[in-house]
Amino acid sequence: MVLWTHHAWTSKLYGKDLDFIYNAVLENHPGFYNKEDPNFRRNLENSYVKAKSTIKKSKLNSNLKKAISKFAKSFHDTHVWVH
């Protein structure tokens, strides 16, 4: 039997949220076609890896939301945000 702590459960949910946001951006964001931002894909990947790592290492629930928020802000796009 596996017992989940509240933090472990919350961390798993935030990880799934991060994956959802990442995939939505990957599939839909016009940044991939913006010639003025040729590093969009690389920045997306780097930000995703950093956020995923932060979520896995985090010991505090407050850092989980900060990781996703920082990921969303990395696009410098007012349409992508975390509330």
Image (spheres, rainbow, N blue to C red):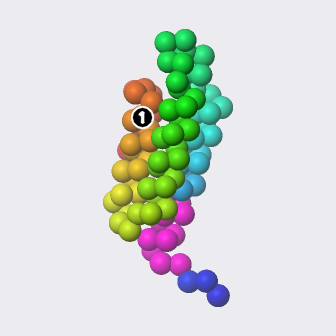
Looking at the image, which residue is at 53% across and 47% down? 49
The region drawn magenta spans 4-14
Q: Position of residue 44 (x, y in %)?
A: 53, 35
Q: Is residue 64 magenta?
A: no
Q: Is residue 5 magenta?
A: yes
Main SS, magenta residues = helix
Is residue 29 depicted above or below 21 in this figure?
above
The quadrant of the image that shows the C terminus is top left
Q: Position of residue 26 (x, y in %)?
A: 62, 33
Amino acid at the residue labelled 1: Ser
Is residue 82 depicted above or below 31 in this figure?
below
Q: Position of residue 77 (x, y in %)?
A: 42, 26
Residue matched to label 1: 74
**Circle 1: is it few (<14), some (14-19), or many (20+) Cα within 10 Å?**
some
Specify whether residue 56 is in view. yes
Q: Position of residue 80 (x, y in %)?
A: 45, 33
